Every structure is written in structure tokens, then in C-alpha cells.
Image: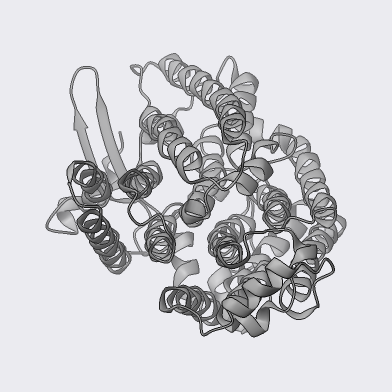
Amino acid sequence: MDTTSITVWSDMVAFPLLTTLTIIPLATMIVVLLLPSPIIALRLGFLSVLVTLLLSGYLITVFDPGRQNVQLFEQFQNINFTYSVGVDGASILFIPLTAVLSLLAFIYLLSTRRVHDQIEIACLLAYEGILIGAFVAMNAMQFWFWCLLELIPVTLMTFRAGSGQNRRWVIGLLLQHWGSGLFMTLMGFLLLAFGVMGSGDTLSFDWLVLKENKATLEYGTLIFFLLFFGFSIRMPLFPFHGWLPVLTEQGTVASAAIYIMGLKIGVYAVIRYILPTLPDIVNYWSWFVLILGLISIFYGALLALMQINIRRLIAYAVISHTGMLIIGVFAYNLYSLEGSLLLSVAFGLATAGLLLSTGMIYKRTHTAYIPRLGGMFEVNAAIAFLFVASALSTMAMPGTPGFDGAHLLIEGTIKKYGWLVSIAILIGNVLTAALLLRAFQQIFIAVPKRTQKPLIDSFRTHSKPSPRNERIIAVVVCSLLIGVGLYTTPWIRMIDQNINAISNQYQITYDAQPIEHMNKDK
């Protein structure tokens, strides 16, 4: 391993920060399960996510965008096991966002009747720890292990707190899809690690070793498709998307915030484990990924148009957005990679806002069907503002982080694929955003198409100021979307910290640095 490619944690902080961020929610989860009082368990869980959020903020302050290497690196090795964690431009923003969304999920949980379910509280904590562990992993098998563990809290939360009637079938569908993805990913990682031995090194799953391997991989194309298809299930990308609309419709909204963040693991994994290790093969098959991305954009938008269930509509919007992100990733230049990462974070926060707002609506009306809803703005203005701000963020409106992210992604796509592909991406994104805005009009402004007396009575019963927890969620999400959107330069600098090394592998030249370009435009 090249020691110049890392900065160990002891050179930057006084304690192993990344391991601490992973352990706190996982250790709290164990304590929560052992506590006799649900109220104490809830308070302890809330304290845990708050401490994790503060530590993730500290992580942002100590991270140095000027160092072009993996920072806060920790490694423990014995004969049969290697534990490696670190953070760079590809992962730095996902960690604090996971912490923020975990806190929002707990605040949402406080406004439901599930506050006495210690298992659900423990699952939320476990999910947070697992996601952070996956984002900081610098070992392929370690990353795979975290993705395997992710099945446990998602399955338990869906079974215990899901809102659908077919939860057992949903769990079976989820296990079928995720299990297939995990198997393909495992096979890809094994073949990739064995390929390192062709260069004379010992068998290793260490990311720093894998990306520096210069040997010709005998099964490079097979490795690419195993990893890409495995990660595509997690994004999800067409045609591997079948589980997402079903799980979104019948799963638990309390976990929707961090669950949506978990979907971004697929995009992150492509940038982390495919682009640096298989540059020649990525370049050869980029046309294939482009086709899947374009299909995903318009397929997701078309299916969203046909939905009358708001949760399914949001799920298909996510599929459409995934197509946009993956095209940007496989344009593999500095502009498109930065845009894809920034949009992944922006879409993650915005989609979580959409799902949390629909969860609040469901809590009041016990329905997610758009024709049965209407006039909700008078019932709860905070939910309406949360929904519309999140919808506009997915549209890449000025003043939201999606604007600069889309700007970078489109410019990078033009350099790689030309104007026609870029125009198609913009059209698909506008269609998806228009569908969300139409849903806003139908839910919050228009009169219900299917007027039912119980629902009208429910409106009148709940036509009071928003509960404090809901107002907090709305303020936090809207403030982050607008605040980050108005000043994205520091976040772009963080992303740029290590992405330039990946783009250089593909011998792309640039006219100007993105930071200077963005400042000039502004």
C-alpha cells in the first residue's frame, strides 16, 4: 500500500472518529433492547442520534479538502481479518446526511404511536450504524458485510411497522432482489481480489490495493457486470427496480428518511469500487449503461404518471432520478462525477422530505391515494411547504443544491455524450418534477375527487396547527435544502477532493476547474 495515499486518524484527531461514528448507534441499539422501559429507550436512542450528528459535524470541520488522499484512515489486521475505514471526497457528504436523516426519523417516530416499540427504535439505530459503516469502509468485503447486515433492520421494520397488508410477500420480494444483488457483488469482489494476485501481490480486498492493481484482469468484463448488476439492484436502476415501489408503498415511513439514504449506496459503490478498478472495461461498456440510464429516466417518469398512490409515485420518481445519476457517473469526468455525487445527496434529502410529508398525511387521513386527498394546505401548511420545497429540489431549481449538481452533471454529460443525451436528461427530470408538483396541487390545493365523509371528518378533526415535531422536520429539511443550495462551493470542494484522481484515469481534459466555473456562473 502506498502510504502517501492515506492520512491516518492520529494525525488529524485525538480519537478514531470514523469507528466511533459507527459504534455509537450500534452500541446504543444493544442497550435499547436490554432496557426495561420504552421511554428510557427512546430517550437514549434520540441522544445517540444527536451525538452522532454532532460528531458528523465535527467530521466536516476536520476534513481537509486540500489533501488529495484518504483521510482519518484506520486499519486493524490479523491473519484472517482486515478492518479498514477512511473518508474521502466520494463519501464525506453521505455520513453527515445519514446522521441528519436518522435524527429526522426519530423526530417523526415521536409523532406516531410506535414510540413504545423498542425493536423499531433499535432497528433505526442499527440502520444508521450500518449505513455509516458502509460509507467509511475501505475494504470490499467489509463493505459487502455491512450491505448484508442492512437486510436485518429493513426486514424487521417492514414486518413490524409497515402500513401494508402484504408485508410477508414484500419481505420475500425484498430478500429475493437484495439477495441476488449481494450474491453477484460477492462474486465480483472475489474475482477482483483474485485478480490482484495476477500482479504478484497477495490476496487482498483492500480498496487501496484493488485500485492500484495494474495487472490485466482475466475476467474483467464478468467482474464489471457482476458488480454493476449487483449495485443496480440497490440504486435501483431499470430493470432491477421491481422491489422499490412495493416496499415504499407497504413499508414503514418512520424509516423512510435513512432508508432513502441507503439507496444511494448503489451509486456510491459504483464510484468507489467500479470506476477506479476497471477503467478500460467501464470505458468500453459505458454505452450500455447510457441506454439503461435513459430507459430508467423515462420509464420511471411514465410509471409515475400512472400512479394514484403518492408513495408509489415517489418511488418511480426515484427510479427516474437514478437513471440521471448513473449517466453522470459513467460520463466519468470531473464535472459529471461531482454533479452525480452532489445530486445524490440533494435527491436523498429531498426524497426523504417527500416521504416524511406523505407519512404525516397518512397519519391524519389513513390513505395515500391522491384522488381521496385534497385541501390539505388548510389542514397543515408546514407539511405543504415541506412537500413543495422537496419537490422543487428534485427539479434542480435555483436556490437548491440540485441546481448546481444538475449544472455540473449536464456539463459533464455534454463533454462525454453530446447535447442530445443532455437534453433527454433535462426533459426526463422536468417531467418527473412536474408530476410531483401536480401531486402537490392535487393533495394540498384541489378539492378531493372522491369525497368521503370519514375523510372529511378527519380533515376537520385535524385542522389545527401542526404538531411541534412536524414543524421541526419541515424547518430542518427546508433550511438544509435552501441553505446548502445558496452556497454549494464548500461542499463541491469536499467532493472534488478525491474525484479528480478517478477522472484522470480516463484521460479527460478540462477547460477550467469546476469550483472556479461555479463561482464565475454565480
Residue placed farthest to the right in the image? 420
Query: Nearest the camera: 398 or 467?
Result: 467
Look at 58% across and 27% down and name the residue there: 172
Residue 29 in picture, x, y percent from top left = 26, 45
Residue 402 in picture, x, y percent from top left = 62, 69
Residue placed farthest to the left in the image? 14
Residue 354 picture quarter: bottom right
Question: Is the N terminus in the top left, top right, bottom left or bottom right quadrant?
Answer: top left
Residue 444 in picture, x, y percent from top left = 71, 77
Look at 53% across and 60% down and name the residue there: 345
Residue 512 in picture, x, y percent from top left = 61, 69
Would residue 507 be seen by someone viewing this image from the given angle?
no
Look at 17% across and 47% down and name the residue there: 36
Which color scheme did the rendering employ for the protein? one colour
Query: Nearest the camera: 205 or 148?
Result: 148
Residue 395 picture quarter: bottom right
Would residue 60 be seen by someone viewing this image from the given angle?
yes
Query: Nearest the camera: 44 or 185?
Result: 44
Vertical side of 405 occupied by 446: above or below: below
Give left or right: position of 415 versus 113: right
Query: Nearest the camera: 215 or 238?
Result: 238
Question: Is the C terminus in the top left, top right, bottom left or bottom right quadrant?
Answer: bottom right
Vertical side of 255 occupied by 292: above or below: above
Total tally of numbered discs in the picture: 0
Vertical side of 385 occupied by 91: above or below: above
Give left or right: position of 18 versus 237: left
